[in-house]
Amino acid sequence: MDIGIVGLGLIGGSLALDLKKRGVAFNVYGLDRSLDHQKKAKELNLVTDCLTLNQLIQKVDIIILAIPVHNAQEMIVDILNDIPERTYLLDMGSTKSGICDIVKDHPKRSHYVACHPMAGTEYTGPNAAVYDLFDQKPVIICDKEESGNLALEAAQQMFQALNMRILYMDSKDHDTHAAYVSHISHISSFTLALSVLDKEQSESAIFDLASGGFESTARLAKSSAEMWSQIFIQNKDSLLEVLDVYSYWLRKFRVAIEDEDVEGLNNLIKEANEIKKFLK
Amino acid sequence: MDIGIVGLGLIGGSLALDLKKRGVAFNVYGLDRSLDHQKKAKELNLVTDCLTLNQLIQKVDIIILAIPVHNAQEMIVDILNDIPERTYLLDMGSTKSGICDIVKDHPKRSHYVACHPMAGTEYTGPNAAVYDLFDQKPVIICDKEESGNLALEAAQQMFQALNMRILYMDSKDHDTHAAYVSHISHISSFTLALSVLDKEQSESAIFDLASGGFESTARLAKSSAEMWSQIFIQNKDSLLEVLDVYSYWLRKFRVAIEDEDVEGLNNLIKEANEIKKFLK
């Protein structure tokens, strides 16, 4: 089977590597609006060749969109308009209800499967592509009843070959949950980075004092601006809700610290400790 | 040389392991107010034996306090009152200006060196003790001009043997910097955990959707309530300052998301990305 990947960054590039390694794809053809990325992807042997969008649509069995959500939303209708009878379209975006709404009534909606692989690193571009990025990770398929059986089977087989755990969710529920367990992590990490830079810009103390704890909470603050600003806007309603909840708990900490309320702080932290059961 | 460690948890236990392994200590004697911890520390061979505080003070060459800051503050005057002429006292607490203030005018202040090793994990107790926890990590010695030369040399030799980078700082400056690069990381992680638990308590979606990014930002939320509630109160003034800065940036994100201000979000995130230069 031949697979076409639009977007040759971390996700697209890593898919290219693994789909070949695991025997799912015979050829992977690529497309990236950055010619540098296309060149790099060929040098790194991520793709057999780079094609135009029209060539890609006609040539491959599965088209995968691994680009920022707003770009996928701009392209998806055009791709579905032209998609051949036995070709399927998957997207890997981090928010799902917007894109699902756009194609809801498209006559070829059944060719499309809305996916979100819960995998990634804070790096971007073809150089960030790594083997086994998806291994044992969850992937969410949204609104599966809107996809045709053949398209769904093609997607399921692909994710099984990648050794992923497939879960099914309504696209709106997906976005709410993603706001809580993924998007707010990024906002808190960006905010942490900005606070520290605010204070420490001209000082070397941060180099000296930053230990493992800081590293791990600030790691996500390296993430791509272009990608995350779009995700935040796409998921605006859920994020405003979670930001209110987050601010509520932050104020609780502030008040307890101001009042030197040991008991109150103890209770807050013990409650937070409950997160243990959800972490490895 | 014989070393006495008060507090046989993550820091005290790991010190015990490495000080023996690296030939600094011939015997390590321990003390922990938890008899369970004392028993466990002996089982794990962290210590040669457990002694009373009076026995410890008389028997060892260096006494190390590896207990929560407020407990160290309660004990330090009594220990200095009884400390023999050639015995030195180090503490490993996470805030330094409070304890330095307490002993400022003590006639045996010169026996004491105020230290903060920037090393740790989110685990606690004797079982959390590991080899090489301090290797290549920074350690801050505060208000070194208040320590006597011999005490300072003993501390320096110990940290060099542990392969730590020694830095010197005023105790008040230390606490301000620690608020920015360590303590606020913990508050943001606790807050994140509380927000997620708030929403997801009765649902399994968090198990499915939580990926590496969530793991790394929420990891610190496992940290000890007893220890951190005291650190936050000890470092109240600096923390209230950093919480204001943090809330300011959080509001900026909220407004930009609410206004769907792509440009504004892009700028915020790009600014946050500058943290790269401070991370590995």
Image (cartoon, coloured by chain):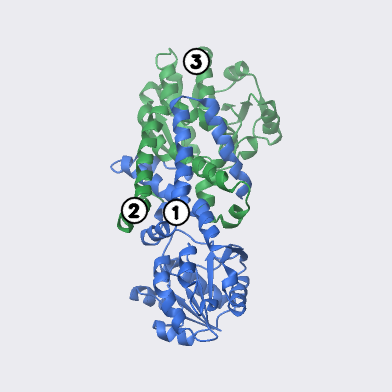
Chain colours: A green, B blue
Q: Are marks 3 and 1 on the same chain?
A: no
The image's mark for residue A77 is 3
**Mark 2 and mark 1: Cα distance apart in space:** 12 Å
Location of residue B163 by image quarter: bottom right
From the viewer's perspective, is the residue at label 3 or at label 1 nearer? Answer: 1
> Are discs 2 and 3 located on one and the same chain?
yes
The answer to whether the residues at label 2 and label 3 have Cβ atoms under 8 Å apart is no
- Mark 1 is surrounded, within 10 Å at the Cα level, by few (under 14), some (14 to 19) or many (20 or more) other residues, namely some
Chain ID for label 3? A
CA distance for labels 2 and 3: 56 Å
Residue B52: x, y in percent?
Answer: 39, 83
Of the numbered discs in the image, which one, if any, rests on residue B153? none
Residue ID at (40%, 45%): B192
Q: Residues within 10 Å of mark 2 (few under 14, many from 20)?
A: few
Relative image position of residue A45 (x, y in whole percent): 68, 35
Judged from the image, the secondary structure of the residue bearing numbered disc 3 is helix
**A80 or B116: nearer the viewer:** B116
- Give the labeled residue for mark 1: B237
The quarter of the displayed image where residue B71 is located: bottom left
| Farthest left residue in view | B202
Q: As shown in the figure, which amino acid type bears the numbered disc 2?
A: Asp
The front one of A49 and B274 is B274
In percent of the image, x 52 and y 18: which residue is there?
A74
* Camera-nearest label, 2 or 3: 2
To which residue does mark 2 refer?
Answer: A259
Q: Which chain carries label 1?
A: B
Vertical position of residue B114 compared to residue A171: above or below: below
